[in-house]
Amino acid sequence: MSVDPDPRYVLRRITPSEWVINDLRFPQDDTRHVVACVYELAPTEVEVVWLRDLPLAIRYGSPFEVLEQVERIQGTSRATRPISIPPLPPLVAD
């Protein structure tokens, strides 16, 4: 597994059972800097409070799985090619 030398997202532990996922694209004083808060419910279960509108689950097996999902969904390009619309002849006024 390769490690990105300049990651966009990082997982930071704030207590023994709590983590945050930060988006390094934004400064720390920007509200978009924190993407999610992750709380340990059991040794193999964590719950996520999303601070961004992401179509992701709220329960995972580990905080690292949460980070992987954020990287996966944010890494996919949402850009699409332009959709060509065939030209129509001008309307004729009666």
Image (cartoon, helix red, strand yellow):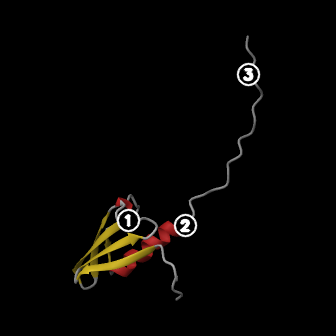
Per the rendering, the mark at residue 33 is 1
Per the rendering, the mark at residue 64 is none
Q: Mark 2 — residue?
A: 76
Q: Pinpoint residue 86: horizontal percent, then vertical percent.
A: 74, 39
Instruction: State which tag comes first along the sequence, 2 or 3.
Output: 2
Residue in front for this viewpoint, 52 or 88: 52
Mark nearer the viewer, 2 or 1:
1
Task: Label 2, secondary structure: give it.
Answer: loop
Seen at 76% across and 25% down, the residue is 90
Badge 3 amino acid:
Leu
Q: For marks 3 and 1, give the CA distance.
A: 51 Å
- Category of crowding for the residue at label 2, using alpha-carbon neighbours closer than 10 angstroms: few (below 14), some (14–19), many (at least 20): few
Q: Mark 3 — residue?
A: 91
Mark nearer the viewer, 2 or 3:
2
Using the image, determine if residue 83 lies above or below residue 45: above
Q: Residue furthest top?
A: 94
Residue in front for this viewpoint, 17 or 88: 17
Mark 2 touches mark 1? (CB < 8 Å): no
Instruction: State which tag comes first along the sequence, 3 or 1.
Output: 1
Seen at 36% across and 72% down, the residue is 21
Q: Residue furthest bottom?
A: 1
Q: For marks 2 and 3, give the CA distance.
A: 41 Å
The quarter holding residue 60 reads bottom left
